[in-house]
Image: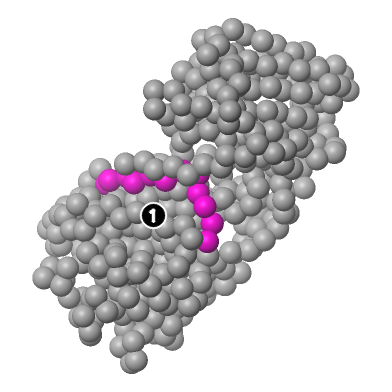
């Protein structure tokens, strides 16, 4: 299942509106399994507890909240919450994954992905389509963070461990492809501790270059040793050095420095009188972000279909001299089929298909790509890019495709130019954004 939210603006906008900012995150397993399956040992009825949880989401107004086990009491949580952007439930047991996001920010893509492997040896993990979600949250103009929400297989048998390790590897592999070049935050119930033997929780550090906020702030960056005796948490707890199954991990990107500034267990904020509302400890972290002084990106425009691509990891450190774009190439007919850039050095970026008519513009030595107009429309019931117009600092233009009634113009700041692309493609262009650099 894939949902999308996309901006649709016609005004000329700057590439970025802010150079820095902050946001906070909460991850919380809300114990929403039907009581007949699991009462979680939590006092009170689940209807009331879920309403209280939602009201506390509103009270503390976390910027991005990712919940797990949000099954049969989902409506009660949302009834008392007022976040402006919220995912729709995928259903209760046995139909839904129990994963949802409540946010103060919009997103441009949302996916639900089912686990490839599960185990019913210890718990009924195969009863529901458990898995993970992925969304591209838009913090500001051209400022995105990919958020992943995870609920891994539970239990301690070999079958459970193998399934859980497969789950975490599946998320890491998805990050490697879908989030290539992007800032990322992973939250959720991993059902894993660093101290347990054989756990694959380190895959996010080893393969995705991510940090765990608990390890960073509480343990000064040193993970518990695998096979050591875990310091387990009570619920509620004031002991920050104890380890829970619920994690928050993150990384920045070449266009954005992302840093965690705070970590806490939020147990005492989520209580009803003297009783907890869930058998899990909610965890939170604050983040600061700062845009790069040399590389940035525009908003994305189009539809969330096709294969993700990103030129950012291979963009040269300097865009001057031999790394300056020399030729802009655009293919199109009834819609936008393909885009490419060739640098003076010979390096080449190309995306989309080979259909349509090729249109090219060769830039002069002191000429730069400084403006772009994109149009989108429907093709086979999917939103796609239909038209691209490139304008240089010398006023030269090249274009391809068909203009629609839904277009957007991108103008870079003085001293910057377009040096690459990111987005999604197939046999044509589905979604496109531009990478910019200082001249």
Q: In which quarter of the image is the N terminus?
A: top left
276 relative to 9, above or below: below
* Residue farthest to the right, as pictured: 366
Measured as percent of width and height from the top left, residue 31 is found at 26, 70
Inspect this view and state whether residue 106 appears: yes
Kindly identify the residue that appears in the image at 22 percent across and 50 percent down. 129
- The stretch in magenta equals 103-115
| 356 versus 49 height, above or below | above
User: Residue visible at 64% across and 22% down?
Assistant: 388
Q: Is mark 1 on a helix, strand or loop?
A: loop
Please indicate whether residue 251 sits to the left or right of residue 372 in the image: left
Q: Nearer the viewer, residue 392 or 247?
A: 392
Residue 212 visible from this viewpoint:
no
Residue plotted at (35% across, 79% down)? 52
Query: Which residue in the structure is indicated by mark 1?
Result: 87
Residue at position x 85%, y 37% in the image: 415
Depth check: give the residue in front, 82 or 207: 82
Give residue 146's position: percent from left, percent from top: 50, 49
> Where, quadrant-wise, is the C terminus in this rendering?
top right
Q: Looking at this rendering, what residue extends furthest in the front direction?
A: 405
167 w.r.t. 348: above or below: below
Reply yes or no: does residue 60 show up in magenta. Answer: no
Q: Which of 200 and 248 is in front in this view?
A: 248
Which residue in the rendered view is the most extreme toward the top?
Answer: 357
| The magenta stretch spans residue 105 | yes
In the image, taking residue 341 as reference, residue 242 lies left or right, namely left
């Amino acid at each position: 299942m894939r949902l999308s939210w996309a901006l649709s603006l016609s005004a000329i906008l700057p590439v970025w509106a802010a150079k820095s900012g902050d946001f906070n995150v909460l991850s919380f397993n809300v114990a929403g399994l039907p009581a007949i399956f699991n009462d979680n040992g939590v006092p009170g009825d689940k209807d009331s507890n879920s309403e209280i949880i939602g009201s506390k989401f509103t009270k503390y107004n976390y910027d991005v909240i990712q919940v797990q086990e949000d099954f049969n009491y989902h409506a009660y949580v949302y009834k008392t919450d007022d976040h402006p952007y919220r995912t729709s439930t995928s259903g209760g047991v046995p139909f839904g994954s129990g994963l949802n996001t409540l946010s103060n920010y919009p997103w441009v893509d949302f996916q639900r992905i089912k686990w490839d492997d599960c185990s019913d040896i210890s718990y009924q993990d195969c009863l529901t389509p458990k898995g993970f979600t992925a969304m591209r949250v838009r913090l500001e103009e051209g400022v995105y963070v990919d958020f992943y929400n995870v609920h891994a297989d539970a239990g301690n048998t070999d079958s459970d461990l193998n399934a859980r390790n497969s789950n975490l590897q599946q998320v890491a592999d998805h990050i490697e492809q879908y989030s290539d070049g992007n800032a990322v935050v992973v939250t959720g119930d991993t059902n894993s501790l660093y101290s347990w033997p054989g756990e694959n929780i380190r895959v996010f550090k080893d393969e995705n270059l991510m940090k765990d906020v608990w390890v960073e702030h509480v343990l000064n960056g040193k993970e518990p040793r695998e096979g050591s005796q875990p310091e387990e948490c009570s619920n509620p707890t004031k002991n920050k050095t104890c380890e829970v199954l619920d994690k928050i991990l993150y990384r920045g990107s070449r266009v954005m420095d992302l840093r965690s500034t705070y970590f806490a267990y939020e147990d005492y904020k989520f209580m009803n009188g003297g009783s907890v509302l869930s058998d899990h400890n909610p965890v939170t972290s604050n983040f600061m972000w700062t845009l790069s002084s040399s590389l940035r990106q525009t908003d994305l425009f189009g539809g969330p279909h096709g294969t993700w691509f990103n030129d950012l990891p291979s963009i040269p450190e300097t865009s001057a001299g031999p790394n300056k774009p020399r030729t802009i190439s655009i293919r199109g007919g009834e819609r936008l089929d393909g885009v490419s850039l060739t640098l003076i050095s010979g390096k080449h970026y190309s995306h989309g298909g080979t259909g349509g008519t090729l249109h090219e513009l060769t830039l002069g030595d002191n000429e730069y790509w400084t403006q772009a107009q994109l149009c989108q429309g429907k093709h086979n019931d999917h939103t796609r890019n239909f038209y691209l117009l490139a304008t240089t600092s010398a006023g030269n233009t090249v274009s391809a495709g068909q203009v629609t009634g839904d277009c957007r113009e991108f103008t870079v700041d003085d001293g910057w130019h377009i040096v690459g692309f990111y987005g999604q493609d197939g046999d044509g262009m589905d979604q496109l954004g531009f990478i910019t650099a200082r001249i």
